[in-house]
Image (cartoon, helix red, strand yellow):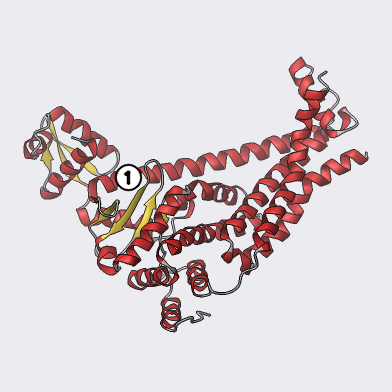
């Protein structure tokens, strides 16, 4: 199984259990039955990247997703929607958001064949 | 004295001319019809300006060492290698040398900073896409589960094209192909790497007007270059409709930038005016200007090396 897929199924499991999970519980919940050590490796990596938080629960750690899935989708898209400043080269967006008056002017120009947007 | 004045003015010319050119280039109509030529001219202005600014420091620094600049430069090289260091140079000459060295270090550090931030952001995007998006083999793209339309590309190897459910619902098949062609053009042309130096230069020299102008003009040119690939594949009006549908459904949040407005206006306007007769000599003139700008500073930089090869001490 690709690491990307394992990361993904671990995140899916954590999103399904907002109260948090132990590494053992995550491993048990996955259809691919990965070793707990493998799951721990990925959980530590994900917590370093800020996708997962952990807190002590007795002798183990309780792992939680730092946000629900929609919040992560929103964060991913923000890179593509907002003016990214110094990291503008990180992604190439198809369009950025523009003002309604520009949108309206362009719509009017496009409706006329050979129209002029100015 | 005359050879020194020539060397100094050759090094300085692109800085003086580049600023004037930049002002004209930013508003030139031809640029939107020949974005590739305009981009080349921006690159030449940037490179020639940088080499010129470094070169003029070197020219001034080695003035006391020899009758002509190239010879002075390689005399200094030999002195440093022999261990006699900066013998024969006065305080002003050392200062000029420091100017050149500081300029190189300043630009390099800003370039490194921008590159690191960009790579970090791209890594974050890849991780989030791994975790969130489904790969669609039909479009060879990653699809985010969001009703908001978006389309972008995360450059790199391999590059990733990202769409959202909202985009798939919004666009008809031809428009979607136009968007994909546009994003693939960004990825294949490594437009991220082309843009990066301009971001770094604008960060390093925010008080230089031409640097700021280039920083805002180059991204628009890159969009136009990608648009040219998309219109070749799907036609002008399909692409124009794709752009319009995407900006309409993205909606205008409170803060939109006037720059973004004018960029989209220029992109759509050139699609609608495509039938206009274009002057074919324009790109040739732009490329020649780029070559002329670069020739001076390059000559100043290359001459010492030639001199070192021809007259080894």
Residue in the foreground of this view, choosing between A15 and A55: A15
Residue occupying image coordinates x 33% and y 63%: B176
On screen, residue B35 above or below B50: below
For disc 1, the chain is B
Q: Residue at x 46, y 81 (%)?
A: A109
- Residue located farthest toward the right when viewing the structure as drawn: B1
Residue B313 image point, x, y percent: 83, 18
Q: Position of residue A14 (x, y in %)?
A: 14, 45
| Quadrant in the rendering for residue A80 | bottom left
- Image coordinates for residue B6, horizontal then vertical, percent: 87, 43
* B276 relative to A22, above or below: below
Which residue sits at x=17%, y=30%? Answer: A38
The residue under label 1 is: B126
The extreme top residue here reads B82
**Quadrant where the image shows the N terminus of chain B:** top right
Is residue B132 placed above or below B258 in the rendered structure? above
Q: In the shown orientation, is residue B97 left or right of residue B143?
A: right
Along the viewing direction, whichever of B301 and A40 lies nearer the viewer: B301
Judge whether A21 appears above or below B27 on screen. above
Helix, strand or loop status at disc 1: helix
Horizontal arrangement in the rendering, residue B249 relative to residue B190 (left or right): left
- In this rendered view, identify the residue nearer to me: B152 or B86: B152
Q: Would residue B20 be visible to someone looking at this image? A: yes
């Amino acid at each position: 199984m690709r690491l990307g897929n394992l990361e993904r199924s671990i995140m899916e499991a954590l999103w399904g259990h907002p109260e948090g999970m132990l590494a053992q519980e995550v491993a048990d919940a996955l259809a691919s039955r990965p070793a707990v050590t493998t799951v721990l490796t990925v959980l530590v990596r994900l917590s370093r990247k800020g996708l997962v938080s952990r807190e002590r629960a007795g002798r183990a750690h309780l792992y939680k997703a730092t946000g629900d899935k929609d919040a992560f989708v929103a964060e991913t898209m923000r890179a593509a929607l907002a003016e990214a400043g110094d990291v503008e080269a990180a992604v190439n967006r198809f369009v950025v958001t523009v003002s309604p008056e520009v949108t309206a002017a362009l719509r009017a120009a496009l409706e006329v064949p050979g129209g002029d947007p100015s | 004295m005359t050879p020194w004045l020539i060397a100094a003015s050759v090094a300085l010319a692109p800085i003086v001319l580049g600023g004037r050119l930049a002002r004209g280039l930013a508003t030139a109509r031809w640029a939107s019809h020949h974005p590739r030529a305009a981009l080349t001219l921006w690159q030449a202005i940037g490179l020639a300006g940088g080499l010129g600014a470094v070169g003029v420091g070197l020219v001034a620094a080695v003035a006391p060492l020899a009758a002509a600049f190239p010879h002075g430069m390689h005399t200094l090289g030999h002195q440093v290698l022999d261990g006699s260091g900066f013998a024969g140079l006065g305080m002003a000459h050392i200062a000029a040398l420091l100017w050149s060295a500081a300029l190189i270090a300043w630009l390099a550090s800003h370039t490194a900073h921008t590159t690191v931030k960009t790579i970090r952001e791209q890594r974050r995007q890849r991780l989030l896409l791994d975790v969130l998006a489904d790969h669609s083999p039909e479009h060879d793209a990653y699809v985010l589960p969001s009703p908001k339309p978006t389309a972008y590309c995360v450059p790199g190897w391999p590059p990733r094209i990202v769409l959202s459910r909202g985009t798939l619902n919004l666009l008809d098949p031809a428009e979607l192909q136009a968007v994909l062609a546009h994003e693939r053009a960004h990825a294949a042309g490594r437009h991220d790497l082309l843009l990066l130096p301009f971001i770094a230069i604008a960060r390093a020299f925010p008080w230089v007007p031409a640097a700021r102008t280039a920083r805002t003009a180059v991204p628009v040119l890159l969009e136009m270059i990608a648009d040219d690939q998309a219109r070749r594949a799907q036609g002008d009006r399909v692409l124009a409709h794709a752009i319009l549908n995407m900006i309409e459904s993205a909606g205008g949040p409170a803060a939109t930038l006037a720059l973004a407005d004018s960029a989209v206006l220029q992109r759509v306007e050139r699609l609608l005016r495509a039938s206009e007769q274009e002057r074919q000599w324009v790109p040739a003139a732009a490329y020649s200007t780029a070559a002329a700008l670069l020739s001076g500073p390059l000559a100043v930089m290359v001459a010492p090396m030639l001199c070192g090869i021809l007259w080894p001490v």
